[in-house]
Amino acid sequence: MIGIALGTLVASDGGSGTDGWGHMGDGWGMGWGGGWMMLVWVVVWVVVLGLIVWGVVALTRSGRRDGGAASPTPTEVLEMRFARGEITDEEYRRARATLEERRNDGR
């Protein structure tokens, strides 16, 4: 009986938080896979944060684009202004002639 008591005393942790063999906790290392699992979780969080940043950047940039449509040419702007009634027939003809002269001169 004394031997059992001494064996239990030697094997017990004595309140130190270990299992009697120098291991802390329940004997499963760090739990759920050990130290490499910590590295996996760091990688997972880096990927998640990267996706969030990418999504925010993609959304903010798409708001600035005009959907891929090219800006109108000077002739198109002139035609739109004439169609809206902003300029008269005479102003339209004069501006159109000026634009064609510039195009032919290479300006």
Image (tube, grey):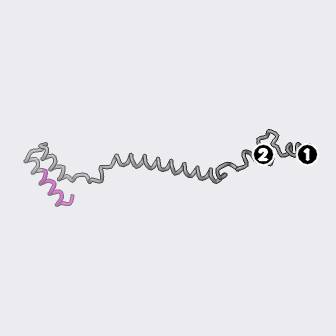
Q: Quadrant of the C terminus?
A: bottom left
Q: Quadrant of the N terminus?
A: top right
31 to the left or right of 95: right
Are the two marked residues, 1 and 2, in contact with CB atoms closer than 8 angstroms? no
Callout 1: SS: helix
Residue in the picture at 50% in, 47% down: 49
How many marks can you see? 2
* Bounds of the magenta segment: 95-107
Residues packed near mark 2 inside 10 Å, few (<14), some (14 to 19) or many (20 plus): some
Residues packed near mark 1 inside 10 Å, few (<14), some (14 to 19) or many (20 plus): few
Q: Of the residues shown, which amino acid type is indicated by label 2?
A: Asp
Looking at this view, name the residue that lies furthest to the right: 2
Q: Of the residues shown, which amino acid type is indicated by label 1?
A: Gly
Residue in the picture at 16% in, 54% down: 99
Does the magenta stretch mainly form a helix, a strand or a loop? helix
Q: Relative to the observer, which residue lies in front, 10 or 35?
A: 10
Task: Say which residue label 1 marks.
Answer: 3
The picture places residue 97, in percent across and down from the top left corner, at 12, 54
Q: Relative to the observer, which residue lies in front, 100 or 88?
A: 88
Which is closer to the viewer, label 1 or label 2? 1
Measure the C-alpha gap from mark 1 to mark 2: 20 Å
Residue in the picture at 30% in, 51% down: 67
The picture places residue 71, in percent across and down from the top left corner, at 25, 52
The picture places residue 54, in percent across and down from the top left corner, at 45, 50
Residue 47: which disc?
none
Residue in the picture at 10% in, 47% down: 91
Magenta-span inclusion, residue 29: no
Callout 2: SS: loop
18 to the left or right of 1: left
Residue 19: which disc?
2
Magenta-span inclusion, residue 102: yes
